Image: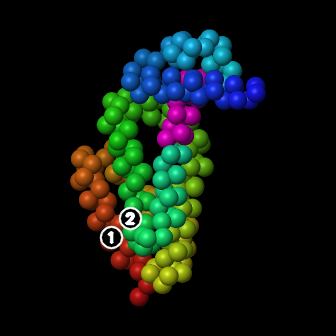
Amino acid sequence: MARVQQADIRHKILEAASERLWHYGFKKTTIDEIAADAGVGKGTVYLYFDSKEDIALTIVAQFKETSLGKMQGVVQNSEMTPAEKLKEMLILPMVDTHHICTQSPHTQEMVAAVRPHMQARMRPYIEQERELIAEVLEEGNRKGVFDVPDTATAARSLKYMVAGFWPPFPCVTELEEKKHEMGLIVDLVVRGLRKR
């Protein structure tokens, strides 16, 4: 019973923090405001989180978990070819990120505030993304579509390849243009990965 209540309190804090941080921004949000919005005391917030940065990183991690769930759905989709899966998996996280950035003008501020801790906290999620991409490359190898000897290295390279399309430093600004340009790049890469 106590664990359920603790999970509920933690969830309420994250929900209140998420709404406030996306709406008002990282700098203008205080722990006192998060606590008040969640209906708990400031001390209770600190029982669950070390700092405002910790809360923000947890919110970003939740976002990444949702994105990973979508990617896993693509991997398991038996109606898609490996090339279609690869294209979707490389574009999907950028689209999700684009949506959150356009819904909240404070997204970039929040990411900048937690950037010093972001790499360590996000590393497991990035590794999972790479593993899922490698899994699709291996599927392509098995089906005779791709010829990729080192799928782990190729997956890492593919993630780096599309990094310029991610906010906050997009080389193209409109979502449809980003999707189109990323699609062209992935199509080019898929042609290079094909078994000859």
Left or right of 3: which side holds 16? left
**Residue 194 visible, this orientation:** yes
Magenta stretch: dominant secondary structure: helix
Left or right of 46: which side holds 181? left
Mark 1 sits on what residue? 187
Residue found at x 52% / y 64%? 76
In the figure, residue 47 lies in which quadrant?
top right
Mark 2 sits on what residue? 87
Q: Nearer the viewer, residue 89 or 110?
A: 89
First in residue order: circle 2 vs circle 1: 2
Residue 146 is situated, as x and y percent measured from the top left of the image, at 46, 79
Left or right of 45: which side holds 147? left
56 drawn magenta: yes
Mark 2 near mark 1, Cβ–Cβ under 8 Å? yes
Local packing at callout 1 (Cα closer than 10 Å; few below 14, some 14-19, many 20+) is: some
Q: Can you say which quadrant of the picture contains the C terminus?
A: bottom left
Q: Nearer the viewer, residue 75 or 181?
A: 75
Chain part drawn in magenta: 49-63
Q: Can you say which quadrant of the picture contains the N terminus?
A: top right
Residue type (three-letter) at the residue carrying disc 2: Lys
Tell me the SS state at disc 1: helix
Residue 108 is situated, as x and y percent measured from the top left of the image, at 38, 34
Q: Nearer the viewer, residue 180 or 152?
A: 180
107 drawn magenta: no
Residue type (three-letter) at the residue carrying disc 1: Asp
Residue lying farthest bottom?
Answer: 196
Residue lying farthest right?
Answer: 1
Residue found at x 28% / y 65%? 184
